[in-house]
Image: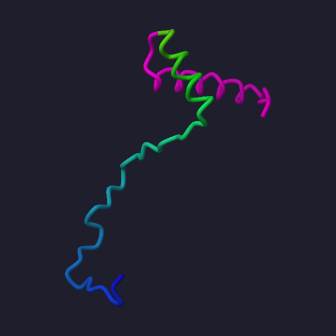
Amino acid sequence: MRQEYDFSKGERGKFYRPNVELSLPIYLEPDIARFVRELARRNELPIELLINNWLRKEIAFMKEGVKLAL
């Protein structure tokens, strides 16, 4: 690593996009990933759709005041 960097020709905010929504990766433990992959395969669904629908149902339960068993 350099002792000092020259940012005199840098452009502030060059890559800033105010309305960009990030897609965050979610890392599943191996046993959960296997289960989800198999469930998606059996139901002929993309994993993303399966997980999103699953989470929507959990969110609905939470909004109704149902406590999750964690």
Q: Residue at point 27% right, 82% down? A: 7
Residue segment shown in magenta = 44-70
Using residue 61 as the reference point, say whether residue 13 is left or right of it.
left
Front residue of 64 and 7 = 7
* Residue sticking out furthest to the top: 43
Q: Residue at point 54% right, 21% down? A: 53
Q: Residue at point 72% right, 30% down? A: 62
Using residue 21 as the reference point, say whether residue 58 is left or right of it.
right
Using residue 49 as the reference point, say whether residue 58 is left or right of it.
right
Q: Position of residue 55 (x, y in %)?
A: 59, 27
Q: Eyeballing the image, is 20 above or below 13? A: above
Q: Main secondary structure of the magenta part?
A: helix
Q: Eyeballing the image, is 7 above or below 32? A: below
Q: Is residue 46 magenta?
A: yes
Q: Position of residue 70 (x, y in %)?
A: 78, 34
* Residue sticking out furthest to the bottom: 3
Front residue of 62 and 45 = 45
Q: Position of residue 59 (x, y in %)?
A: 65, 29
Count the marks.
Answer: 0
Q: Position of residue 1 (x, y in %)?
A: 36, 81
Colour scheme in the image?
rainbow
Q: Residue at point 33% right, 89% down? A: 4
The quarter of the picture where residue 6 lies is bottom left
Q: Is residue 20 magenta?
A: no
